[in-house]
Amino acid sequence: MAASVKTLALRTLCASTRNIQHVSRGRVKHSCCPAWVTVRRGYSDGTEGKNTHFGFETVPEEEKAERVYKVFESVAEKYDVMNDAMSLGIHRLWKDTLLHVMNPQPGLRLLDTAGGTGDISFRFLEYTRSMHERQQRQKARSSQTPSWRDIADNYASNQTDLPQSRAVVCDINKEMLKVGKQRAEKAGISTGLSWVVGDAEELPFDDDQFDIYTIAFGIRNVTHIEQALQEAVRVLKPGGRFLCLEFSKVSNPVLARLYDAYSFQMIPVLGEVIAGDWKSYQYLVESIRKFPDQETFKEMIEDAGLFCVKYFNLTGGVVSIHSGFKL
Amino acid sequence: MSQHVLRRLITGVFNVQRSETYRSALRVGSCVKINKRCRSDEVKGSESCQEFDVSILEFLVCPLSKKQLRYDENSNELINEEFGIAYPIIDGIPNMIPQDARMIQKTETSKNPSES
């Protein structure tokens, strides 16, 4: 009860101050558009008046991307710390589960969209590396009394196999990637990891390039989810897998009440105390409520052209993994 | 003795000031800025700044035209010849957002195309 009153008050406060900014910013943007550019994005004329949600607010579509950018720019430094604090470390288990569902074999290429600080990519490389080692050990065990020649051949093949697993982290926000790159340097992960600043709705990659496409806790921040899904289908190889880890609807009503109370009362407070940013974390919990539920999202993925779409609920539906294949 | 110490102190201060003015002059061009970091980060070696991994050019394309890009080492940019736009590479991370790309004009001036 208290949560809903608080959010209502916040909403009215914010709406009154932000409306003025919407109008002025909108006018400036339209005036500086060269002609050749509008040909490419012809549909934008039709959607100029369209609105979308930014948390519980309604904002013009053009604005959402900018505002999401600002949110993540301000939280980038403390992003990992906040994740641990908000989820009490459970986000690590969710991401580990994603990797287990993915079960990647060594030698695959991963596109980690909205990868930010690179959590999924690090886990992917770690997983494929340990799997590769395990396979080598099994091979060594199964071959009985290998000759010195066999052992020498094994050493030669080791060097060529290992660097093949490749992870590309793509995010629209430079600050998040910078933090991720520093983490990679500290952890000593250098081979097989690339960083690219790019838009999930307009990926800078060629068709049929990636074996696995993941988007973890990022798709709810995208303005046009259908477009991001279509881009995912485009860059996946035939037989490639799409995986999405995202907050979703909790089915159990008791758990739902507890979760709501925790989200709206604890998380913005934690955001203020640890990261010094109440509004960004208010946006984050509101955007979770605005995201479609498991079944609706499954239908959206099927509409984009993926097959065998399944979802797995984690922690009672707080988080769910959607998986689909490009066939 | 104290005079000698004082003289060393003063020349040291001047040396610092001189190197700082030298560095601020270098800060003019963005590509030159990356080179400056190379010189100062001698511990990591020059590899840490020109770290751009050319192997991603295998599948990295222009987000607008989906055509291959050319890596220009001098200006540290990825160039799409067809549209005449250049995507900057900052800290080894290519920035493939069209709004942040630079138009390569036939005249000397460059402006940012904005797309919405």
Image: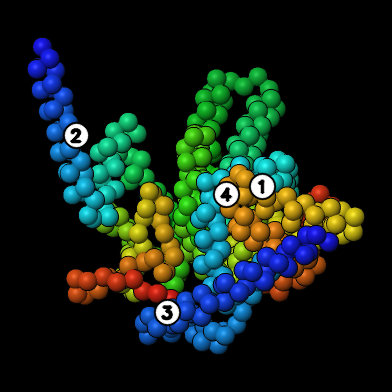
At mark 3, the secondary structure is: helix
Percent of width and height locating residue A28: 42, 79
Instruction: Tell me the CA gap for discs 2 and 1.
Output: 44 Å
Cβ atoms at labels 4 and 3 below 8 Å apart: no
Instruction: Tell me the CA gap for discs 1 and 3.
Output: 36 Å
Q: Earlier in the sequence, mark 4 or mark 1?
A: 1
Q: In the rendered image, is residue A93 in sight?
A: no
In the shown orientation, is residue A102 left or right of residue B96? right
Residue under the point 26% across and 70% down: B110
The residue beneath circle 4 is A276
Which residue type does callout 2 highlight? Val
Q: Are marks 4 and 2 on the same chain?
A: no
- Residue A270: give its label: 1
Which residue type does callout 3 highlight? Val
Instruction: Tell me the CA gap for discs 4 and 1.
Output: 9 Å
Assess disc 1: are there few (<14), some (14-19) or many (≥20) residues with their C-alpha within 10 Å of its C-alpha.
some
At mark 1, the secondary structure is: helix
- Discs 1/3, front: 1
The residue beneath circle 2 is B16
Percent of width and height locating residue B19: 18, 38
The residue beneath circle 3 is A28
The chain to which mark 3 is attached is A
Which residue type does callout 1 highlight? Leu
Cβ atoms at labels 3 and 2 below 8 Å apart: no
Q: Earlier in the sequence, mark 1 or mark 3?
A: 3
Instruction: Tell me the CA gap for discs 4 and 2.
Output: 37 Å
